[in-house]
Image: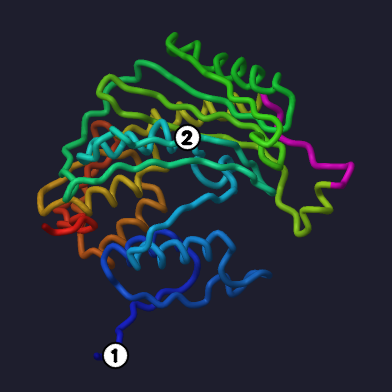
Amino acid sequence: MGKTSYVRLKGSRQFRQRLLLATLSSTPILVEDIRSDDTSPGLQPHEVSLLRLIEKVSDDCTVEINETGITNDSKDSSVDTFRTTTLHMLKRFGVPLEGLMLKIESRGAPPLGGGEVVLGVPIVPNSLTAAHWVDEGMVKSIRGVTFSTRVSPQIANRMIYAARGVFNRFIPDVHIFTDHRSGPAGGRSPGYGLSLVAETTSGCLISTDVAVNYPKADETDVMEDSEEKPDMLPPEDVGVQAASTLLGEIEQGGVVDSTHQGLLFLLCALCPPDVSKVRVGMLTPYGIETLRNIRDFLGVKFVIKPDPTTNTVILKCVGCGMKNLSRKIA
């Protein structure tokens, strides 16, 4: 057996995406200098857990996961956005929605988490389907859900009232639901926030999240027992910020919002050797890095063409032909 040739990478930037692409493309990687300049260098606990999960799945083991963690924070998209927007993107690429579900058993806010979700994924067909997805449509409705854990239930109503005050000037079809959790279902830390999604006449879903929670402390027990805790953003400001951010995403155009650009490009690249064509708003730094990672790991290059009439960007590519080989051959 010859010596393994590794692709050498540095830093923690897009660590999860690089692991995913390396696994899909069977590319050995060596990641060095992970947070070498930080006070706490190296991998974070959630990254170690991801590595262990990938190792088990790649070895064709049966994995049962029952982890408690964070479901809503200010860094990543919430489980609400994942359920209402991310999962529905998959149907554009031929993934059946039957059996595709995400159930929120309990919510968890930073720093102590305590959230738990159940994710069900159906058997994906042999390959994805190339997509021609450029029609943005016009916004016809806005839906949303507030979350609140270990705080007053009235906070949710204050967020909704503030958000509707922004939307009522533009569109009447606005419905925002509440999800207040207490006890074990509310996790171990207080927090609240708002997840919004706009649906267009062509079926596009544009989403945004705003979450508020106490900052992470070096010693969470000290913060938990402390009588003086930092003030969190008022619920009214959360509602206005979430609504304004969603309007900004709509203004940018595209068939997905800025946080879903990376996933959209990845799905296009994994399609069969056929042309996929999609429209997005202004390319984000994360989206650009995703295009580079796709080129390096999958060998897929996108043709990028700005559309000055709509201030959007059209991207086209030929998929790498990734197939699902997880089933037994008769």
Task: Give the residues drawn in magenta, as a range.
Answer: 225-235
Q: Position of residue 180 (x, y in %)?
A: 64, 25
The residue that mark 2 highlights is 103
**Label 1 SS:** loop
Q: Foreground: 240 or 180?
A: 180
Q: Amino acid at mark 1?
A: Lys
Q: Quadrant of the N terminus?
A: bottom left
Residue shown at the point (81%, 53%) measured from the top left: 221
**Label 2 SS:** strand
Does residue 60 lie above or below 134 as drawn?
below
Q: Position of residue 298 (x, y in %)?
A: 23, 63
In the picture, the disc for residue 3 is 1
Tell me if 146 is positioned left or right of 200 in this view: right
Residue ranking furthest to the front: 330
> From mark 2 to mark 1, how far is it between C-alphas?
45 Å
Q: Amino acid at mark 2?
A: Lys
